[in-house]
């Protein structure tokens, strides 16, 4: 099995993909961003950037737009796979955030359920306050429903 080819200027390319949408870019656009305003661009670095572009096309992160390309100049566009690469770290971070938040929300639900149990025990011991306390139970149940709705929303965002 062939070993994956390392991507030259990996960090620089990831920064470009994070900050830019690639549509009809030429290799010189990548070179300019990676090398900065460096007047004297090293031919070896320039070759490495071209090599990286070939790798990105081969693995379908970039595509070459034939209608905008010439024999000597390719026009690069990002693919759906590039979009997934851009979104994947965000979803991972959201997953971590949501996991912590869900634990917090589940604890709130548990506290409210304990409050409901306590109020019900008060009602059993003191039937004359049942009507008044049932309104408190109803309010707590509404709050539990809202919390469950937030948990459901987080699950839907990650789905």
Image (cartoon, helix red, strand yellow):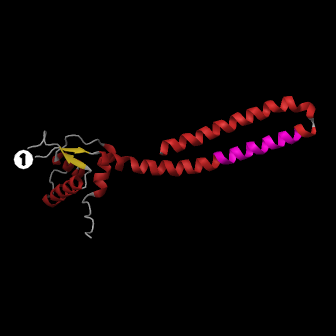
Q: Which residue is mark 1?
A: 71
- The span shown in magenta is 105-122
Residue 129: x %, y % from top left = 89, 31
Image point (92%, 31%), residue name = 128
Give the quadrant of residue 59.
bottom left
Name the one closer to the observer, 53 or 142.
142
Query: Residue lying farthest bottom?
Result: 1
Q: Quick one: SS at disc 1?
A: loop
* Residue 74 highlighted magenta (yes or no): no
Image point (15%, 58%), residue name = 47
- Say which quadrant the N terminus sits in: bottom left
152 lies above or below 139? below
Residue 115: x %, y % from top left = 79, 42
Residue 67: x %, y % from top left = 13, 39
Q: Is residue 132 left or right of residue 66?
A: right
50 lies above or below 145? below
């Amino acid at each position: 099995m062939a070993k994956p080819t390392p991507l030259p200027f990996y960090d620089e390319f990831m920064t470009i993909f994070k900050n830019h949408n690639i549509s009809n870019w030429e290799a010189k656009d990548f070179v300019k961003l990676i090398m900065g305003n460096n007047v004297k661009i090293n031919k070896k670095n320039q070759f490495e950037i071209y090599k990286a572009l070939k790798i990105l096309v081969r693995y379908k992160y970039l595509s070459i737009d034939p209608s905008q390309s010439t024999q000597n100049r390719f026009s690069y566009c990002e693919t759906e796979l590039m979009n997934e690469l851009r979104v994947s770290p965000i979803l991972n971070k959201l997953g971590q955030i949501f996991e912590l938040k869900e634990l917090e929300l589940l604890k709130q639900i548990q506290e409210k359920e304990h409050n409901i149990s306590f109020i019900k025990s008060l009602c059993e011991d003191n039937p004359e306050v049942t009507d008044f306390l049932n309104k408190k139970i109803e309010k707590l149940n509404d709050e539990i429903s809202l919390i469950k709705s937030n948990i459901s929303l987080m699950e839907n965002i990650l789905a």
